[in-house]
Each structure stands twice: as C-alpha cells, then as structure tokens.
Image (cartoon, coloured by chain):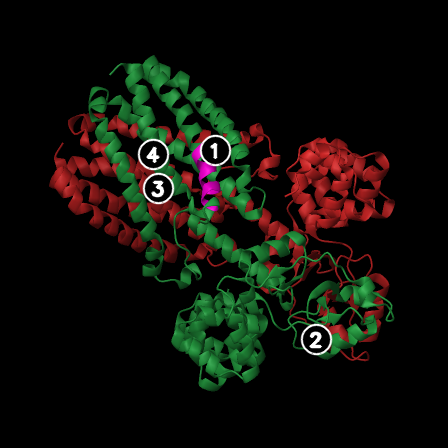
Chain colours: A red, B green
Amino acid sequence: MTDLTELVRVNDLEALRIWLVDTADHGIADELARLDPDARTYIFRLLDRNRALSVFEEMEAPLQQNVLEGLRDDRFRQLVEDMDADDRAYLVGELPASIATRVLAGLSPAERAKTAALLGYPPESAGRIMSPDFVSLRASMTVADALAKVRRAGDRAETVYTLPVTDDERRLLGVVSLRELVLAAPSNGVESMMTTRVERVRADDDQELAARLLQEADVLALPVVDTEDRLVGIVTFDDAMEVLEEEDTEDRALSVASAPLGKPYLAASVMGVARSRALWLLVLIGAATLTVNVLQFFESTIEQAVTLALFVPLLIGTGGNAGAQAASVVIRSLAVGDVRFTDLPAVVWRELRVGVLLGGLLGGAGFVPMLFIFGSDMAIVVTTSLLTVCTLATIAGSALPLLARRVGVDPAIVSAPLITTLVDATGLVVYFLIARAVLGI
Amino acid sequence: MTDLTELVRVNDLEALRIWLVDTADHGIADELARLDPDARTYIFRLLDRNRALSVFEEMEAPLQQNVLEGLRDDRFRQLVEDMDADDRAYLVGELPASIATRVLAGLSPAERAKTAALLGYPPESAGRIMSPDFVSLRASMTVADALAKVRRAGDRAETVYTLPVTDDERRLLGVVSLRELVLAAPSNGVESMMTTRVERVRADDDQELAARLLQEADVLALPVVDTEDRLVGIVTFDDAMEVLEEEDTEDRALSVASAPLGKPYLAASVMGVARSRALWLLVLIGAATLTVNVLQFFESTIEQAVTLALFVPLLIGTGGNAGAQAASVVIRSLAVGDVRFTDLPAVVWRELRVGVLLGGLLGGAGFVPMLFIFGSDMAIVVTTSLLTVCTLATIAGSALPLLARRVGVDPAIVSAPLITTLVDATGLVVYFLIARAVLGI
C-alpha cells in the first residue's frame, strides 16, 4: 500500500501522480478521508477538472467542506458549478452558512435556481436527493422520437435508463426504460409500451421511504411527483443506496445509544466521538440510579442473605441480553417493512412464548449446578427469576419499538443499552420479591 | 388495507383478482410473506405466468420453497425454467436436497447447464449471485455494430446498460455503457469510448465484497472474471442491494448475539426464533458465571460494606454501554471500509482518550450527589471505578473487533452482549479492588 502521508511529506509529485492515475475515484476518496486536512487538500489540488469532480462526488460532506475551504476561488466555483444539482443541494444543506453562501453565490443563475428549488424541500425528504435533470417523454411519441429526445437531452441528465412519460400538465402517466426503446421497432408508440403500474414518491416523502421503495421494487430510478402528481424529479439507485447506508449507520449508532458521527470514524475528532456518546450515557446512568434505589430498598434482605448479591450481574445481564435480542429483530423488521404496528398483539404473544422457552432453557440448564453449590432454595430463587426476567425482557423488547413507531419516534431509539437499563431495575424487583417469598425473609 | 386472510376464507375470487391487479409485485410478495402457507399458495396460484414469475422473484427463499411445494408439476417447471439463472442458482443453494433435485430435473438442458455452472462457485461467492446472461462487445466494433448486438442479444440478458468489452480470449478490456452508445455517433469505435479503469471482482470473491465495491464505485453492474481475468458474468445493482440488506440484517442479529433468522420475522416459527437466540444466551450465561465467582471472592468485602452491592448494576451497566458504543462504531467502520486492522494502535489510542473523557464526565456528574448521600469514601470509590471501567470498556470494545477481523472471524461477533459480559467481570474486580484500597477493608 502506498504511504500517502510519506509521499506528501517528501513532496514526491511523480509518485503521487502515478498513484492518482492508478486508483479509482472512490479509492482516492477513501484514502483522502484518512489523511490530515492539509495533505488532503494538497493531493486533491493535483487532480484535473474532471477527476477532481468525480473524486469530490465520492467524498462525504464534512470532507467536501474541508476540500472546498482549501481551494482557490476559480477552482472552487468550477467544482461546485460542475456538480450534479442533487449532490450540490445535499452538500449545501450540510455546510455552515458562511461557506454555503459562498457556494450559492459562485453558481450560474440556472444551476443556482435548481439548487434553490431542491433546498426548498424539507431536510431528509425525497426532494432533497432527487435530480431535477431528467428526460421525460410524451405518450404520443414514437420510439424514434423518444430516442431522438434522449440523444438531444441526455447529456446533462442524471439518468436516461428510466424515462418517465407525462401528459400535457406534466402529470406522470408511466415509465419506459431505455432498454425497451432500444430493443423496440422505431415506429412503435411509447404509449403502448409504457409500464403504467409505476411506483412513485412525493417530493416531501421521507428519503428513507423512497430508498426502501426503490430497493423493494428493484428499479433503477423512481419518479418523484408533487402533491398534484406532476413530475418534479427522479431519484436514482446510487442516491438510494447512499441513503440506505447512512440510515443503517444511524440505526447502528442508535442501537448502542450513540448519536451518529456523520463522518468516517477516523475523520472525526476525539471530542466529536465522545460527544456522540456522552448524552445517552448520562441519560442511561441517570436511569440506572433506579437500580441503586431498588437495591437500597432491599438492603436488609441482602444483609440477611449476601449470597443473593452474587447473582445480580448474571441475572440482569441475561435479562438485558434477551430483551436486546427481541428489540433488535423487531426494529430491523420494522425498518425493512416485515412488521407493522398492527402486528403488536401477534408480536408480543410470540415473544412471550420465546421468552418462556429461553428462560426455561437457561433456568433448566442452571438448576442442577445451583442445587449442588448453593442449595435448593437459592436454586429455586435464581431459576424462577431467570424465567420471569427473560419473559419480561422479550415482551418489553418487542413491544417498545412498536410503541415508539406508533407515537412517531424512531424505533431504533429502543437500543440494547436502553432495554438493558429498563430490565435491570425491573429484574431486581422480581428477583428480590421471589427471594423473600422463597427464603421467607 | 385489504384483509387477505378473510378474502381467502370466504373465497372471494373477484376481490382477490382486483387486489392482485392493483398491487405491485413486491407488495404482493410482502403480503404473501405474512399469510399462512395454505393461503399463500392459494393466492399465488391465481397469478398468470408472467406475474407469478415476477412476484416469485421478489420472495425470500424459504417462502419460495413453500410456494414451489404447493404447485402442480407443470407450473412448477415453467416457473423455475423462466427464472433468471442467478436467482435460480441462489434458490437451489438454499433448498433442501429433495426439492433442489426436482428443480434441476425439470429444467431444459441449457438452463440446467447455466445453473450448474453457478452452483460450482463457493456459497456466498460473487459467482453465486452473478448472471451468466450478459451482452459483451469487442473493442473493434463500431457503435452501430454494438447497438445491433444489443438489439440481437439483449432480450435474454440480465442488463444491457453495462456492456463489458473483451479481447479474443474473453479477457476483460473495459466497459461501455448503453447511454454512451446511444449518445455517440454510430461510426465511432467502441475502443476509443470504453472506460478501461474498470472495477471487477473474481467469481470466487466474497459476495459482500462485490456488493460493497459496486456501491462504492457507484456503478450499475460489475463484471465478474475468473482467475485469468476472463469474463464469466456480471453482478447487477439489485443483487448487490439484496446482498447488502442481508448482510446488514445478519450483522444486526449478531450485534445482539443472535443467529440470523434467514426469513421474515413473522414467517419464522416460535421455536425457530428461540433457537436463533438460545445458543448465544447459553454461552453468555456461561461466561456470566464468572461474575458469580468474582463476587464470591469478594463476599467478605460485601458483608463488611453492603452499600458496595448497591452500585454493582449501575457500574457494570455503564461499562457495558460504553464498550458496546465503541465496538459498534468500529464494527460498522470495518464493514464499510473506513477502518482496517493496521489502524489498531490509532483506534485504541483514540478510544482510550474517549473512555477517559466519558468516564470522567460520568464520574464528575455523579460525585457531588454521591458525596452527600453516601459520603466521601463511597463517592471516591464509585467515581474512580466509573472512570477506570469506562476506559477499559472502550479499549476492549474497539480492540476486539479489529483482532477478530485479524484472525479471520466476522468482527460483528463482538456483540454488545459479549462486550457487556466481558466488562462485567473485569469491572467488578476493578471496583472491589478500589473499594478495598479506599475503604481499607
């Protein structure tokens, strides 16, 4: 592997140029993300206009900002002018106001108008990731007309593989693919060929919804319409894949109670990383003080049977694990559309049975060793508690994400740590109540 | 929402037919996944040949198997004969031997040969998801020749948008897109137009690698070559998206110590769900017995200061959370290629600092309330322990996934529950040692 930092340090331009020629755009973008800002700008400046654009479009917004700040005014303008309108709108949405203004000010009137139109849609909406540069057809066209239009207008378009067909009021009637046009006889009519059962999204729909629909429907691009079903843009598969990767990264961060970093891990600062985790840790440790209260309440019970304290981590740990397993599968199923809120009773009923099975299995496996080491009373207390805690945990783990979705909160917020913390306090109450009953204290 | 179960029960064919016409293929597939097997087969049989195929291709393998088992022999043969070779190979790889044999036996010789060739590649390899039905060009062709070939051979091909260019030995020279062909002058040469810096994968490469490369490179399709760089197939974006969704679902299951279900949640049996979680729960409860031993070792310390027991869940819970946060971001960064094994020292060094920051923050926030409620000794013990445990947790959480990758184990195995369980025992040792030193017992 080429050591770029070293090449920049010794200023070996020849070796850097060879590396830039040999490496794919996304490979260059990946390596630039791993360098310090100065080396990054230095190498980026070595790229010619076309490659600079294609490498730039592969970079993530915080690093794009970084590169922009290091460019002279003419290269800065050229770069943002050449960007696709949707990528540019996304970037402007992420930039601090001062540099966003500089981007918009440098644009030609046509490109500025397009960017402004996209920025008019709400953040995270399909309108923000759609491209306004599409080629649309009329139903009355022949295949030859349509291909002529593609040749005339296709150069600037984001895609020419999915061609929406509209009426006189720009309302979406159907879609024809370039493949169908190329394989058809030139005299065929577009109307007779077009697919009319077309998935579409509204510009103000959530972008994750659009991306999942594109993936589910296995299409290359999805037409975007306004409230009156008029065509306003097109979302392409690459934008959808990026949205899905981002959403998955966000869900993963939430699943362990972190805020998303919003940039590659190694490009984030130590303070930035700590900040992404601090708030949730504070909330969770706040919630965990409940366990201190519960234990304080049962302090005399512990004093009378210190052995009880030995099983606290094992018991609440197992409950947390069982709850996290249930929560995770329900959250994922909600995200990919396999489960909906109305499935709540069915889901809770199945998780109740799963919890009993798992709790029974774990309690059963532990009963005999417990019996020999700690005696029958403790064996009964611990195994009964395991059964109860596992069942409560799977029920809570499966119900909470569905309830969160119901009240409009991202179900991914029901993280393993959150479930663990909730189950901890409840589990302790169950454990000590069972202990008091069985041990008679 | 149409209640399909009800429509099947009252046998309302008219309403079912209307619903089938109104619903997209993937929508039908989604709803079928939610029905019981009999209703599923019943509705599937109402579809005509073309729609049956497109709905079938949207279904997941276990449900496809289910549908196949309910079909009469002629429809069975027709359906599997019409499938894309790559989808069929994938399905056969998932089916039990008896029904896989029935699928292969019913195929025409040409389709059987293609399927057998794909099945010759290792499971989970790019060869298993590639399509052998592609249109390839020669460098010596003109644009007009190339378009003629697309018209001639494009009907059966999986895609005609990405057209690999090969030499006489079928070695991959470059790629031309249909868009470029359509926009170019007919007399242009393919050689002068083709992109030669082409990402490719080997047929025996891992399919996740292929899918991530396709996503990173923002291409519609990726040529697949053999060990001698000869073109053998093409992986398209829809297969790649499916692989990525599956890998993400798998990683998510692993991240909470479950085995992947391999089918939609509601289509799995209660026993199947319990089985996917039982093994890991047993392993983890086995590991958690370590906490019982640690506490037993410090039993006399607890007897002398029962207050110490009150903070056990809070302390180990927080350590587990901090460790899971670190592990999750490192696992995700490894998956998307932002971090590699060689980054280990840099990653551990940054997580050490993050751990100190977070532990310091949590300890700092808790110090004053602790001081007032439990006195200075306990305040010192708990806050020092928090700092130490958080730091150990972030170090372990970040180092373990990298070490797993190094020894060839899927880093996703370093789940939140695993980290929590490991941190629990270590954290308890740290806590009681600090307690003994500070309290002088």
Q: Which residue is at the front of the view, A50 or A306? A: A50
Q: Check the residue under mark 2 and report the chain it is in.
A: B
Q: Which residues are magenta?
A: B395-405
Q: Which residue is mark 1?
A: A280
Which is in the foreground here, disc 4 or disc 1? 4
Which is in the foreground here, disc 4 or disc 3? 4
Instruction: Give me the C-alpha separation between circle 3 and circle 1.
Output: 17 Å
In this picture, residue A124 sits left or right of residue A278: right
Q: Is residue B68 above or below residue B24?
A: below
Q: Which residue is mark 2?
A: B154
Instruction: Give me the C-alpha separation between circle 3 and circle 2.
Output: 54 Å
Asked if disc 3 and disc 1 are in contact, CB closer than 8 Å, the reply is no
- Callouts 3 and 2 in the same chain: no
Which is in the foreground here, disc 3 or disc 2? 2
Residue A142 visible in the snapshot: no
The kind of residue on which mark 3 rests is Gly
Check if residue A232 falls in the magenta segment. no
Residue B412 visible in the snapshot: yes
Residue that appears at 16% across and 46% down: A368
- Callouts 4 and 1 in the same chain: no
Q: Check the residue under mark 1 and report the chain it is in.
A: A
Q: Which residue is mark 4?
A: B424
The kind of residue on which mark 4 rests is Asp
